[in-house]
């Protein structure tokens, strides 16, 4: 066999050997990802993860005492924001009761969770009525109320649907509305959209995870 041919074969063999070694190194690196000493991602949330969403970022509305409140003032705590109305027969009281249960399940960390209730029925939900309503669920529940125009603008910015459903009289209407809640982390960032009916245990798990995040 000629020397040139031998050299060519040798070069090909060396090249193939190099490819094999590179592939082995890649496989070894991938295998290392599965070892117990490798960093692991956080457990998935039970709610819908909407981290990075560009809506539902800010609001400014009055509480029952007339004080203007914003989401920014709650930094350092996890906020669960829900839109509803006091005469709601099922979804609203169920959600509020669930939040009260979650705060209890979290023990001492429950004090770091702030439920915020925004009415979509400002015509009937007076400041006095809202104050009494949220007090039924906990002393640190916050109620917010805007003018009809403010309510409309906030609902649009937060992608919340609501619409009056006529009743037997002009004042006995009900209101169809979006049933999800928004959850903000301790840095004030929108993180989750809850599923109505997901249950207190699932929500408590999500909030516990947010409360444990560093930074």
Image: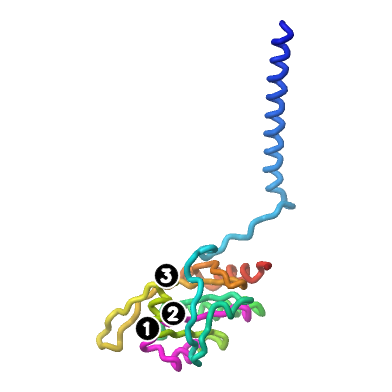
* Cα–Cα gap, marks 1 and 3: 16 Å
* Cα–Cα gap, marks 2 and 3: 18 Å
Q: Is residue 105 visible?
A: no
**Quarter where residue 17 is shown:** top right
Q: Classify 197 as above or below 43.
A: below
On the image, the x and y values in percent for residue 174 come to 33, 82
Q: Please say whether residue 8 is one of the residues in the magenta stretch.
A: no
155 with respect to 204 (left or right):
left
Q: Are marks 1 and 3 in contact (CB under 8 Å)?
A: no
State which region is magenta: 110-134
**Quarter where residue 109 is shown:** bottom right
Mark identifier at residue 159: 3
SS for dot 1: helix
Q: Earlier in the sequence, mark 1 or mark 2?
A: 2
Mark identifier at residue 92: 2
Q: Classify 202 as above or below 172.
A: above
Q: Is residue 104 visible?
A: yes
**Residue occupied by mark 1:** 148
On the image, the x and y values in percent for residue 120 come to 40, 81
On the image, the x and y values in percent for residue 185 come to 59, 71
166 with respect to 205 (left or right):
left
- Taking the spot 68% from the left edge, 20% from the top edge, the residue there is 12
């Amino acid at each position: 066999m000629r020397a040139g041919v031998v050299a060519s074969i040798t070069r090909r063999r060396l090249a193939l050997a190099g490819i094999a070694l590179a592939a082995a190194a890649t496989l070894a690196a991938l295998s290392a990802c599965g070892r117990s000493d490798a960093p692991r991602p956080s457990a998935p949330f039970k709610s819908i993860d909407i981290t990075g969403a560009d809506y539902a970022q800010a609001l400014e509305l009055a509480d029952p005492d007339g004080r203007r409140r914003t989401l920014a003032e709650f930094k350092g705590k996890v906020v669960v924001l829900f839109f509803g109305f006091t005469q709601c027969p099922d979804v609203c009281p169920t959600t509020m009761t669930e939040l009260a249960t979650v705060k209890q399940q979290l023990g001492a960390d429950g004090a770091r969770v702030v439920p915020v209730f925004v009415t979509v029925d400002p015509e009937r939900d007076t400041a006095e009525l809202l104050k009494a309503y949220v007090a039924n669920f906990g002393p640190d529940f916050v109620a917010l109320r805007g003018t009809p125009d403010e309510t409309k603008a906030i609902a649009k910015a937060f992608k919340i649907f609501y619409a009056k459903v006529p009743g037997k009289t002009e004042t006995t209407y009900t209101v169809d509305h979006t049933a999800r809640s928004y959850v903000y982390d301790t840095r004030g960032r929108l993180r989750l959209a809850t599923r109505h009916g997901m249950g207190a245990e699932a929500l408590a798990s999500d909030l516990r995870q947010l409360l444990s995040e560093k930074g």
